[in-house]
Amino acid sequence: MPHSVDLITTIAAALGLALIFGFIAVRLRLPALVGYLLAGILIGPFTPGFVADTALAGQLAEIGVMLLMFGVGLHFSLDDLLSVKKIALPGAVVQIAVATLMGMGLATWWGWDLMAGIVFGLSLSVASTVVLLKALESRGVLATPNGRIAVGWLVVEDLVMVLVLVLLPPLAGMFGGSTATPHEGNLLATLAITLGQVALFIALMLVVGRRLFPWLLWQVARTGSRELFTLCVVAAALGIAYGSAALFGVSFALGAFFAGMVLRESALSYRAAEESLPLRDAFAVLFFVAVGMLFDPRVLMEQPLQVLAVVAIIIFGKSLAAFLLVLAFRYPLNTALTVSASLAQIGEFSFILAGLGVTLGVLPVAGQSLILAGALISIALNPLVFQMVEPAQAWIRSRSRRARELEHRDDPLAELPADVASHSLSGHVVLVGFGRVGQRIAEALDARGLPYVVAEQQREAVEKLRGHGIHAVVGDAFEPAVLIQAHVARAQMLVIATPDTFKARRMIEIARTLNPRIHVIVRSHSEDEAELLRREHAVEVLVGERELANSMVRHVSEHAEAHATAQP
């Protein structure tokens, strides 16, 4: 009897067709993921011809989610997560509530019962982590304040969905679901147990994991074997993710995210991220193919108005709620639009929740089909939604004085105190960005006693800086008002510590208009971008890799000279 090759067939068909359709999509100036989704539809059970193993594809997609979340955790520290808690925690909870109410209203209009409406609304409320991360990475904004807020928001959503998945069976039993559960009527006990498990997992990861796993990674690296190092990284990502789900009831994605966060404590975290990148990309493609396999195209012809209503809630309804919430927390318009675009889709948790609802008999099969259709369409449209952020930002600002006022004028952190501005700021340094690079620059300025003003988009960082007596303003320095409030007109130097070259050009233009003699230093990741900035604006540009190489050459030269001097 020949052995089964279903796994090999599924992987080969999925990756091969994803390559073909992804290439066609890119040539047609469409996002590559549209091609991946089409490849999944083609090999799915709802279209004629070859049908791949849906169950296997789903598991391969889950591995992709784990590896992607692990990679994000490697670049996302606990401080980054805590720094956005004031907006991510209440924002995500309120946005989930609003989107759930929208879904419940739609379900009630269609004649569904209360539990069906709750499950349906919750399924529409939670965005796909994979889609969000791919969108942020492709635009180079994952490590920016906006990216940190969006990721923190998604982490809170994931935690809420973990609780929902645990509480849904007892709720279904109480409200007449078709499947009995052992926890009927014991909702508070189930909630307490779940919260305790999640809290215990997080505590173990932060207390024990932050010491154990970096030590393990270092021990493996000392062997000098690249294969063992890669194996250690992947085993840690998948092992911790699986263990967190099996022992603590935490989702695979959340477990992998915390695995990456604890491994970030190691000096080898960047090498770990680099080694796992090819696997992350390959399995992320399988995720989109798996989504396409779940989609039945007949729903578009049989229920077109219902599909449009679902897509409207996903793309416009909950995104508008998030937009207003971010503005209510006094964040810039750009942050509100970025977070809104990030949430304008649904994904993996929506599928899991809808499947569980159907199994428990509280969600109609038609509801699951509509959720899958909404997910596929919103995922395909999400790159286009992101492309609309900048035009929407310009349109809103040009037509709404209130939007401009909300962003700057009535925010006490958007301008320096009058006494500070009038007495102590002249010949200072304007430092744009207070991330890892910006903090090092600030430390050097403090050590030399040089006055400076920080322009930073993250409110919590500005509040903390002001608490330590450091001059800082909140806002995007891409906007003239922010640099004006930092008194760039009286500054001797502008230091742009953020890697966004497009925005850096605009900052330089604003600064030179207000202060033609100001000296500008810019950070860049690319030699081509650096050369373009030097040619267009005559500024000093520092490229990370080149500066690292120069520093290493300097140390080598100093050591060689010292050794030569010591020789008899």
Image (spheres, grey):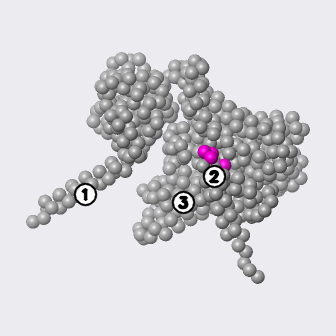
Q: What element carries label 2?
A: helix
Question: Can I make out residue 158 in this image?
Answer: no
- Describe residue 57's horizontal placement relative to residue 267 as left or right: right
Residue drawn at x 84%, y 45% as measured from the top left: 301
Position of residue 522 measured from the top left corner of the image (x, y, whole percent)? 37, 38
- Describe residue 469's horizontal placement relative to residue 353 as left or right: left
Density class for disc 3 (Cα within 10 Å; few <14, some 14-19, many ≥20) is few
Q: What residue type is labelled 2?
A: Ile
Q: Which of marks 2 and 3 is nearer the N terminus?
A: 2
- Describe residue 214's horizontal placement relative to residue 343 as left or right: left
Question: Can I make out residue 515 in this image?
Answer: yes
Judging by the rendered image, the residue that carries numbered circle 1 is: 556
Residue 62: name its quadrant. bottom right
Residue 513: name its quadrant. top left
Judging by the rendered image, the residue that carries numbered circle 3 is: 278
Residue drawn at x 60%, y 20% as measured from the top left: 399
Q: What stretch is highlighted in magenta?
A: 28-34
In the image, which is nearer the foreground, mark 1 or mark 2?
2
Position of residue 122 measured from the top left corner of the image (x, y, whole percent)? 75, 42
Judging by the rendered image, the residue that carries numbered circle 2 is: 24
Gap in Å between the C-alphas at discs 1 and 2?
A: 49 Å
Screen quadrant of the N terminus: bottom right
Q: Is mark 3 on a helix, strand or loop?
A: helix
- Comparing 383 with 414, the one in front is 383
* 303 versus 477 height, above or below: below
Q: Does the magenta stretch include residue 31?
A: yes
Q: Which of marks 1 and 3 is nearer the N terminus?
A: 3
Gap in Å between the C-alphas at discs 2 and 3?
A: 22 Å
In the image, which is nearer the foreground, mark 1 or mark 3?
3
